Image: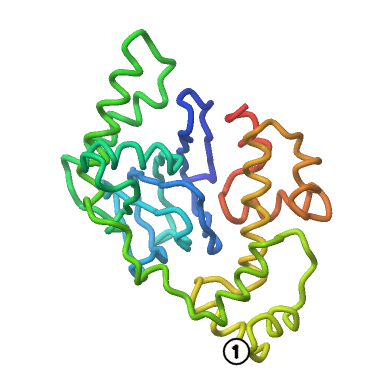
């Protein structure tokens, strides 16, 4: 029987997070600020993605783009296990610039699930380097693996503008949250900003962003918390700075979204 196990490995390469998990946990809808690419090791899962609901099984490569709303639940009772690498956008941007001879700075994963044996093998190799204790040649090996992995997984096309379009009225409500995620807000506030009814805001917000206004606000706040923890801020201070009532509330939201605790994350990245 598979137990709920998450391991956030110590950060050995700047801008890269290394995570492996074996769990039956069903993740709430959430986003990451990084690019994520991983491999299903055992079992299978179903998840929401920017391309709709998809399924992935052992041997499949899985991807997620920054800001892409997704969730995840196991298929069957046995759970699933996977390994993931999360890259800061600046690292991916540098690789894309190299691959396109400077023509593009941004790109995105086009497919949330990639069924490619060679790409899966390449991911296993790069994950092993990311999880290792290093060596005199580790950086060179890492650099060449990153470039080749992303070249195979990322189509060299700019990010689709259609994916980014949001109605102006809903954009006004989104901006109201983005401008100050720590400010107390009501649905009436968002309705006033957008010129819509409260019901129209909830429906339009969810259609445009994949999240309800409250879920979007919680995501923005947990993004703040995750960045602060990555900078070495104590957990209690990060909770308050992120707009949470206390550390316990922050921890509940963090675990529901990511599967591991803020404490485990802090130990890995600091």
Residue at image point 31% right, 12% down? 137
Q: Residues within 10 Å of mark 1 (few under 14, many from 20)?
A: some
Type of colouring: rainbow
Residue in view at x 56 percent, y 79 percent = 170
Q: Is residue 174 above or below residue 178?
A: below
- On the picture, is 40 further left or further right than 66? left
Locate residue 150, reporting x and y percent.
Answer: 27, 41
Q: Residue furthest front?
A: 103
User: Residue 110: where, in percent of width, then height?
Assistant: 28, 58
Pick out the residue farthest to the right: 245
| Left or right: 248, with 28 as reference point | right
Residue in view at x 83 percent, y 50 percent: 246
Q: Residue at x 58, y 55 (%)?
A: 257
Q: Nearer the viewer, residue 48 or 207?
A: 207
SS at mark 1? helix
Q: Nearer the viewer, residue 107 or 18?
A: 107
- Image quarter (top left, top right, bottom left or bottom right) of the C terminus: top right
The residue carrying mark 1 is: 200
Instruction: Residue 13: name its quadrant.
Output: top left
- Quadrant of residue 141 in the image? top left
Q: In the image, is residue 144 above or below residue 81?
A: above
Query: In this orientation, which residue lies closer to the viewer: 38 or 238?
Result: 238
């Amino acid at each position: 029987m598979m137990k709920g196990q998450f391991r956030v490995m110590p950060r050995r390469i700047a801008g890269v997070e290394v995570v492996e998990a074996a769990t039956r946990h069903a993740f709430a809808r959430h986003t990451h600020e990084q690019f994520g690419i991983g491999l299903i090791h055992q079992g299978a899962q179903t998840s929401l993605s920017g391309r709709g609901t998809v399924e992935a099984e052992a041997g499949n490569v899985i991807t997620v783009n920054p800001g892409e709303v997704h969730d995840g639940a196991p298929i069957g009772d046995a759970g699933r296990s996977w390994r993931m690498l999360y890259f800061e956008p600046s690292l991916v941007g540098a690789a894309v610039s190299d691959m396109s001879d400077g023509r593009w700075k941004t790109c995105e994963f086009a497919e949330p699930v990639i069924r490619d044996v060679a790409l899966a093998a390449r991911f296993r190799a790069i994950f092993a380097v990311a999880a290792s204790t290093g060596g005199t040649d580790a950086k060179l090996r890492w650099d060449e693996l990153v470039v080749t992995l992303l070249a195979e997984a990322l189509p060299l096309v700019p990010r689709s503008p259609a994916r980014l379009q949001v109605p102006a009225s809903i954009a006004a409500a989104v901006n109201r949250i983005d401008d100050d995620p720590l400010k107390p807000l009501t649905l009436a506030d968002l309705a006033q900003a957008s010129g819509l009814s409260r019901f129209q805001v909830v429906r339009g917000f969810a259609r445009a962003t994949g999240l309800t206004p409250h879920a979007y606000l919680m995501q923005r706040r947990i993004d703040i918390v995750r960045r602060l923890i990555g900078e070495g801020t104590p957990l209690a201070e990060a909770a308050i700075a992120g707009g949470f009532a206390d550390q316990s509330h922050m921890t509940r939201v963090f675990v529901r979204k990511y599967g591991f605790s803020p404490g485990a994350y802090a130990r890995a990245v600091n």
